Image: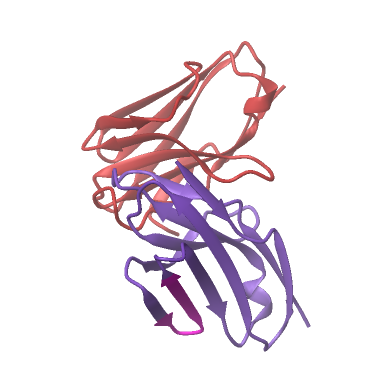
């Protein structure tokens, strides 16, 4: 238990579906992150929020839309995904943006 | 940008010592992190180096040489539960991004 929870843990969706991933941190941190982890590839940073403001967006396709309504919650809205988007999506949080990041267990996403 | 290299796989024997190397080329540097990730689980923090030298934490130690763009993670008295992927990550000057290597999959055998 790292203090970061993610739901759902597994998700299967079609290319025309809309779904959302949820992340919640119980650590009082003020920065939250979305990462994508694909087989045989490094963890890829997707988005960073600091104090609920998006501070980094690493050229992620618009079919991925993040939302950070408060410092404890982070969402990733998914729309018209492609099969190559199938991966493990990890959420992380940290106190400020340069310190140790605590990861959630991830959502295993399969796009059919 | 960042280019981070680490071996893909390593095998070691229970009770032994193993060293996992990581080299990096970076346009900015704000510390080097090591994470452990068991299959199907979240990465968990192991160590952080921002100055040159060795940081020891129980059975695990991490070393950094900024001039050489080099770090290693040393695991002593290996246990079966140490079988996992070990991720090297470099912090960027922006303070936000952690750029990860592909990870080293360590198998500990009896």
How far across and how far down the image is residue A76, in percent? 44, 28
Give the residue displayed 47% in from the left and 79% down from the top.
B61
From the viewer's perspective, is B31 left or right of A63? left
Start-end of magenta stretch: B56-64
Percent position (x, y) of residue A83?
A: 69, 23
Residue B89 located left or right of residue A84: left
**Extreme top residue here?**
A16
Q: Quadrant of the N terminus of chain B?
A: top left
Report whether residue A104 is seen: no
Quadrant (top left, top right, bottom left, bottom right) of the C terminus of chain B: bottom right
Q: Residue furthest front?
A: B67
Q: Residue at x 28, y 48 (%)?
A: A97
On the question of residue A106 being in view, the answer is yes
Main secondary structure type of the part rendered in magenta: strand
Residue at point 30%, 47% (across, down):
B93
Which residue corresponds to the image point at 45% horizontal and 84% vertical from the top-left? Answer: B58
Residue A109 drawn above or below residue B91:
above
Find out whether residue B60 is within the magenta segment: yes
Q: Is residue B78 above or below residue A58?
A: below
Would you identify the image quadrant in which residue A52 lies? top left
How was the colour assigned to the protein in this rendering? Answer: by chain
**Which chain, by letter, is purple?**
B
The x and y percentages for residue B29 are 35, 54
Q: Which chain is red?
A: A
Residue A66 is a magenta residue:
no
**Residue A39: image x %, image y %?**
68, 43
Determine whether, in the image, residue A112 is placed left or right of residue B67. right
Location of residue B22 by image quarter:
bottom right
Count of picture labels: 0
Farthest left residue? A51
- A33 or B51: nearer the viewer: B51
Answer above or below: position of B105 versus A86.
below
């Amino acid at each position: 238990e790292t203090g970061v929870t993610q739901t759902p843990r597994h998700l299967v969706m079609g290319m025309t579906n809309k779904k959302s991933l949820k992340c919640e941190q119980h650590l009082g941190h003020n920065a939250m992150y979305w990462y994508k982890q694909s087989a045989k590839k490094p963890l890829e940073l997707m988005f960073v929020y600091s104090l609920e403001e998006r501070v980094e967006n690493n050229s992620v396709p618009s079919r991925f839309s993040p939302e950070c309504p408060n410092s404890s919650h982070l969402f990733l809205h998914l729309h018209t995904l492609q099969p190559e988007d199938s991966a493990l999506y990890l959420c992380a949080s940290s106190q400020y943006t340069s310190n140790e990041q605590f990861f959630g267990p991830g959502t295993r996403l399969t796009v059919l | 940008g960042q280019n981070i290299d680490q071996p893909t796989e390593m095998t070691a024997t229970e009770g032994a010592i193993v060293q996992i190397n990581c080299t990096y080329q970076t346009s900015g540097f704000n510390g080097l992190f090591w994470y452990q990730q068991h299959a199907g689980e979240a990465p968990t923090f192991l160590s952080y180096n921002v100055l040159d030298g060795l940081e020891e934490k129980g059975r695990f130690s991490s070393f950094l040489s900024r001039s050489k763009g080099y770090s290693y993670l040393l695991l002593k008295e290996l246990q079966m539960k140490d079988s996992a992927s070990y991720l090297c990550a470099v912090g960027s000057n922006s303070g936000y991004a952690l750029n990860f290597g592909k990870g080293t999959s360590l198998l500990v055998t009896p």
